[in-house]
Structure formats: C-alpha cells, structure tokens
Image (tube, helix red, strand yellow):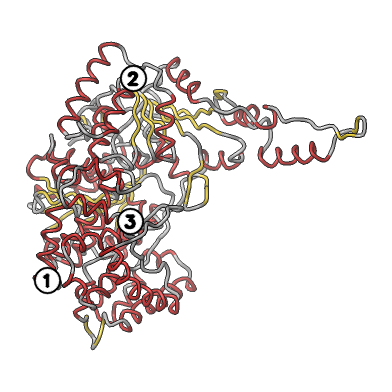
Amino acid sequence: MSSTENAPSAHGSEPAFQLDPFQQEAIRLIGEGCSLLVSAPTGAGKTVIAERAIEQAMARGERAVYTAPIKALSNQKYRDFQARYGERVGILTGDVSINAGAPLVIMTTEIYRNTLFEDPKRVADIGWVIFDEVHYLDDPERGTVWEEAILFSPRHVRILALSATIPNAHELAAWIGTIHGSPVRVVTEEQRPVPLVQLYQSQNQMLKDHHELKSRGYQGHEDWARWRQTQSHRHRGGGRFRGGHRRQRSFGAEEYGRPNRVDGMLRHLIDTQQLPCLFFVFGRRRAEQLAWELVQNDLLDSRERSEIHSLYKELCTRYQLGSDHTAYEMEDLVLHGIAYHHAGMLPTLKEVIERLFTSRLIKLIFTTETFALGINMPARSVVFDELIKHEGPHMRPLTTREYYQMAGRAGRRGIDEVGYVYARVNPNRIAYPQVVRIIQGRPEPVMSRFNLTYATILNLYRQHREQLLEIYPRSFHAFQSSEHARHASRRVLERKLNLLKELGYIGGGRLTPKGDFASGLFGYEMALGELYELGLFDRLTEEQLASLLAALVFEPRKGDKPPRYAGWVKQLAESCHEPLRRIHRRESMAEIHPYTKQPFFNLAPALEAWMRGAPFEKLEKLTTVDDGELVRAFRMVIQLLRELSETPFAGPRLQATARKARERINRGVVDAEAQLRTA
C-alpha cells in the first residue's frame, strides 16, 4: 500500500483516508523486517499498520498472531479480518476455536502465552505477533500475562506492539529489543486525525473551557468540597444571636451546587448537532437508569424508526433473543434512538446493540468503559458522566490514559472535522486541580506488573530447572526497577518456587504428577492440583466437576450474602476447605500475595439446571448474577473443561467427564462459537 493509496477502515463502512506520515513510517519499517512499537492516540489508525504486518507474513508463507486484551475485541477483530482475508483467518480464545491453524489467528493474550508453554511447535512458523493495546501490560490483574507473552516469545518472531499514547514508549521498546536480541523501532504520533474539543457541564451549565469551569463551575475555588466544609462549620458555629437563639443559615445552590441534568446535556447535543454520542458511565445500573430517564426523547425520524425497528427485530431473531426480557424491554429505547451497553447483558444482545450503533441508527448509547477498549465504535461526541470511578471499595479519579482511551472515540475520520468531549463535573466530588490533571496532564507511563503465576513457574521449571530464577532479571519489572526492588522480587520468586517444592509439585529435580497436572491450569493451578492429589476428580459427576470449576472462576460482589449450601454442593465445598486452608497458611508464612483464590459455589444451582436443559431465562430464579456475568462464567468453565479434556496428565476418566460436561454447557446463548458464526 503506497502513501497515496486509500486506507480502508477495519469495518469497511467508514470513508477511505490517506495514510498519515506515522503510518507510512511504520509500514516502511515493517517492509524492512523490523520489530516496532507504535504509540498513537485512540482512533489514529493503527489497524492499517497491523494489516501490513499480517500481509507480509502471509506473502512469506508465515503465520501471524493477533492478540487482544478482551474476548469482545478478539471477536470483533476476527470478524473484521475475516471480511478482509476470508478463510485465512481463525480465532482461539479458550471458549472458541475456529480454524485455529489458519495463517492469521486471533487470540487473547492469555491463550498466546499458554501456547508458548504448552505447544511451542505451534509458534515455530509464526512471523509476526501483534500485541494490540500493549499498554494493558500495566493492568494490575492481567498485566503480567502481557509481559510473560512478550518475554517468552521466540527470538525469530517479529513483534508489532500497538499502544495508546504513552510517554515511555522508548523504554518499553528498549526492553523488548534487549530480550529479543534485535532493536525495536519506535513510531510515535501525538496528533489525532480528528482533533478533540474539550467542553464541560458543571452547575448545570455548558462551559467552553477549563477557565470557565473554574470561574463558573467551581466559583473560583480550587477545592469546592473543602470550601463547603468550611462554610458549613462557619454557619453552624457562627451567626449572631437574636432573642437568645443563634441564627442558622440554610445552604442554597451557592454552597451545594446545582446538579448536572442529563436532559439538559441531551438538549445541548441535539441543538448543536453533536449526535451520535457515546455516554460513558462507571456502573451498569447507572447506564440503564440514564437511558430510561431519556426515553421520552425521540432522536429518530419516521424513516429511521421504521428502519431500526426492522433491523432490531431481524437481529434479535438471528441471535435467538425472542425470549430475553432485557431485549424485549430494550426495544422501547431502541425505537427512540437510545440504548445502553454493559458487561451484565447477554453477549448476543450487546452485539445487537453494537450493530445498531455502527448502522448509525442509535444516536445515544450509555456504556461502561470496556466499550472503549479497541472496539471500533466512533461517534461525533463523547460524554463522561463523571471523572471518578470505583476501584475495589474506594473511588479514585480517572488516569489521563483512561480518559483519552474513551475520549478518543469522539470524531469519525472522514466524517467529522472535530470530535466533542464533555466532562460532567460535580465540584462536590472532585477538586479542580484533579480535573486539570486528568484532561491536560501527560498520559501515565506503562509500569510492569510482573508476578509469575505458579503454573508459569512450573512450566519454566520443566524447561530450565533451577535456572528459571535467571528469568526474572530479563523481565520489564527488572528493567524498570531499582536494585532493592529487583532483589525483593527475586526473593518472591524464590519463595514461590520453594512453596511448590514443599507442597509436592516439584520433587527430585522434576515436576511430580501433581505438578504436571497443575502446569496447564493457569490461574487455578493450586486449588485443582491439591484436589487432584486427593483423588477427588475420580468421584465427580459432570455437574459436580463443572460446578467446582465455576466456583473457582466466580467472584461474588462485595456485600453479596453467601448462599447456604446443601447436598453435594455442601460436600464439595467442604472438600475444598482444608486444602485451600493449607495453601493459604503456607502462602502467609512465605509472604506471598495475593493468596490462591478460594471457591464460591454461588452458581452451582444455576449451572446444574442449565446442564439439565433448563432455558436460560429460568436461571434468574436460581441466581442474583447478571445475565452477561453468568454467561461469562459459564464460558470460562468451558475453557477450563477444554483444558482438562486435552491435557495428557488428567487421565482418561477425567478427560471424558470434562468433555461431556463441556458439551452439555456449550449451547444456546453460552455457545460463543455459534455467536461468531452468526452472520
């Protein structure tokens, strides 16, 4: 593709555009066979660069792997690349395996990492590995997977790392180049193809810049909440006496502020012709609540309403959503050009909403932040409900990188001259300097989250024995850290290795049968390894095995009351108690954190009913978990069952039980492959 050719979009529905200089430079380097890291704003057009690497691999008779951080993005990339490359594309995400031997395979990063250990022959003919959203490397929970995937990739593989704008791109590239023995070139782009206009809603006023935000939103105060506290104290303790009583003054809008009305926000977007709009919120129920608040607004003309009604009916039929109550209720919103989208919805219903949005018939969508993670769904404007989010039990401000990951969805290339971004600011909840830091600060550097899992250590021990301790100095964590931090991290690795020896996963300089069994069960290896040693799996039915795995993958929300277990569920839970207690005691003594996850059997009744043929809509009586969360848990169980059925260390009985259990779960809305195969 020359610099004068038009570059197609991933979806093929957006207008073509001329290649930017950074795209030309990256494509030139790919042509020279260089590994590279591309750091550019969201929506700048990094997929075009990935396509060149893929095409180079195919032209040379090599294979390419495209990794993504979440399954929704993997699924979208599979469809996008399938439209471009046809049968030369496959996907492998644990619960989905379609055409896995294709020249281009889309994978989640976890599956690619696991493949490096479990079946290294499968990467022997790979020419390029594309790490999309590589800044995910500093995700607190899953970042270590990215680091391991890069660290253990064979040296013959060329790497294309795609990232949102990060200030330490050269540091990350230098590390990759060091461990792979050849330089990694860096291509950066600061400018967006569609510039962003930053605006605010505060005190229920539309404000054009941060100066107006401070003067009219914060009324000149840096920290409104602290100023209000001072005013409150003064009014309670001060005031003149009249008739022997202290005069009290009630607070008004001046002190408390005026709430930002969402209908006012919508009216402004309509009047300024800034629809369609992505409205980001930080809670599932909040997304639904705001959508229903605005259902009386009609954003479609009669032609659009007729068109979206037909399309919605057709898609719901195609994805077998006729009996889903959420899909039924959503229709009223959809007919007004409004929708919501979050992880608690059925995956098929989320896909229907995404398709309606790309058809440009949905004008306003309330969605949580995962919608911004690489999914190609641009709009004319983006609105942030607020600039703080939950992290565990606490609230924290957004990072600059998080903000621009979402804000970057504003402005459609080839359609909009600018993209509009609105931050709804409540001065009582966030101080003015924090707002400025989020929106005007530099994106945060990517920091290592390296924390080798027990399964990774077992796989490394199988290959390197005690020399695996020399792996850590090659990590990005060691590359970034002080000598003291490097020493502390190496000690943690040593303690994990010693714990595996103490618990019998390693003995006599090799993995024991328990260690072999656990080495392929990333994330759940210790609990399953202990139960394997006890011989528990030989006694489990298909429902019991599946429920045990569901208990390991499920994480109840804070405040959820644990159900009372009975019958075989209670016996199974009790069987897990002592082995987990022993592991936690050893981890505590060794100062290893976080502890091995304990099982929660909340989903057992729903899963048992599903395996016995119950329709999905009947499961809501057996669990309080959202539909999407339930499907996601069932799909994770399918992934673990697949691993158990394929590992040579499980034994024929467990393999057969796992295979039959997977077949019984993998139906209807749970069947991810069926969803992908639906045109």
Q: Are marks 1 and 3 in contact (CB under 8 Å)?
A: no
Q: Earlier in the sequence, mark 1 or mark 2?
A: 2
- Where, quadrant-wise, is the C terminus in this rendering? top left
Q: Is residue 152 left or right of residue 495?
A: left
Q: Quick one: 652 or 559, which is closer to the camera?
A: 559
User: Neighbour class for label 2 at 10 Å: few (<14), some, many (≥20)?
Assistant: many
Foreground label between 3 and 2: 3
Instruction: Name the residue carrying label 1.
Output: 648
Marks 1/3: CA–CA distance: 30 Å
Instruction: Name the residue carrying label 2.
Output: 336
Inspect the image, locate mark 3, and give the three-letter code of the amino acid beneath it: Asn
Q: Which mark is residue 602?
A: 3
Marks 3/2: CA–CA distance: 38 Å
Q: Quick one: 600 or 144, which is closer to the camera?
A: 600
In the figure, 11 relative to 57: above or below?
A: above
Residue at left 11%, top 71%? 648
